[in-house]
Amino acid sequence: MIKQSLPAVSPITPENFETFTKSDKVVIVGFFNADDTTSNQTFSAVANTQRDDFLFGATNDESLAKAEGVKKPAVVMYKAYDEGKAVYTGAFEQVPLQTWSKQSAVPLMGEVGPETYTGYMESGLPLAYIFVENDDDKKRLGEALAPIAAKFRGKVNFATIDAVSFGGHAVNLNLYLGPVTTLLIV
């Protein structure tokens, strides 16, 4: 509900920057010059389209852009997981920005469940399911596969799935879940 109660794009200042960027799991901030109407309009269009998914803020403060190591116009995603920050480097257009935000918001090694499944499907990328039976398997396989997930970030999403609770999903994918944990990319 926080996302809907705020404006599509919240104004960011040096005073509220730190608080705003930590106010949700994923926060996206645009850095623009005040007179750059094209970038502002593009960013606002992205924010209006994805405001149910992410918090958006914008600033024209040069000291913030410098402190964050970006050159205006820029868009930075702040995350409460993984590397904590992702900088957009593509064309400053609505569709590429929206695609980037959906893909970049997906954790490097996440977990598929009822609350995350839609996000994985909407990312538009293949999903590598890692069926695990317990937290030890999840930790062990997550650590072992993290370098591979990092190498293929933006091309394939990697996520564990509880084989006990969602083992039936393996059947839907024509998999047999035997004593060895299964990895499948679909």
Image (spheres, rainbow, N blue to C red):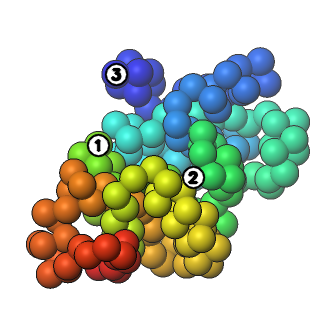
How many residues crowd mark 2 within 10 Å: few (<14), some (14–19), many (20+)? Answer: few
**Residue closest to the eye, 89 or 184:** 184
Image quarter of the C terminus: bottom left
Q: Amino acid at mark 1?
A: Glu
Residue 62 figure quarter = top right
The secondary structure type at the circle numbered 1 is loop
Which tag, 2 or 3, sits closer to the chain's start? 3
Q: Amino acid at mark 2?
A: Thr
Which residue is denoted by mark 2 in the rendering? 38
The answer to whether 100 appears left or right of 130 in the picture is: right
The answer to whether 31 appears left or right of 166 in the picture is: right
Q: Residue furthest front?
A: 179
Residue 155 x %, y %: 48, 78
The answer to whether 181 appears left or right of 108 in the picture is: left
Residue 90 x %, y %: 61, 69
Which residue is denoted by mark 3 in the rendering? 1
The secondary structure type at the circle numbered 3 is loop
Which tag, 2 or 1, sits closer to the chain's start? 2
Residue visible at 52% across and 66% down?
141
| C-alpha distance separating marks 2 and 1 | 35 Å
Which residue is denoted by mark 1 in the rendering? 115
- Camera-near label (2 vs 3) is 3
Residue 175 figure quarter = bottom left
Q: Amino acid at mark 3?
A: Met
Residue visible at 80% across and 55% down?
71
**Residue closest to the eye, 35 or 58:** 58
- Reply above or below: 76 against 7: below
| C-alpha distance separating marks 3 and 1 | 16 Å
Residue 98 seen from this side:
no
- Camera-near label (3 vs 1) is 1
- Camera-near label (2 vs 1) is 1
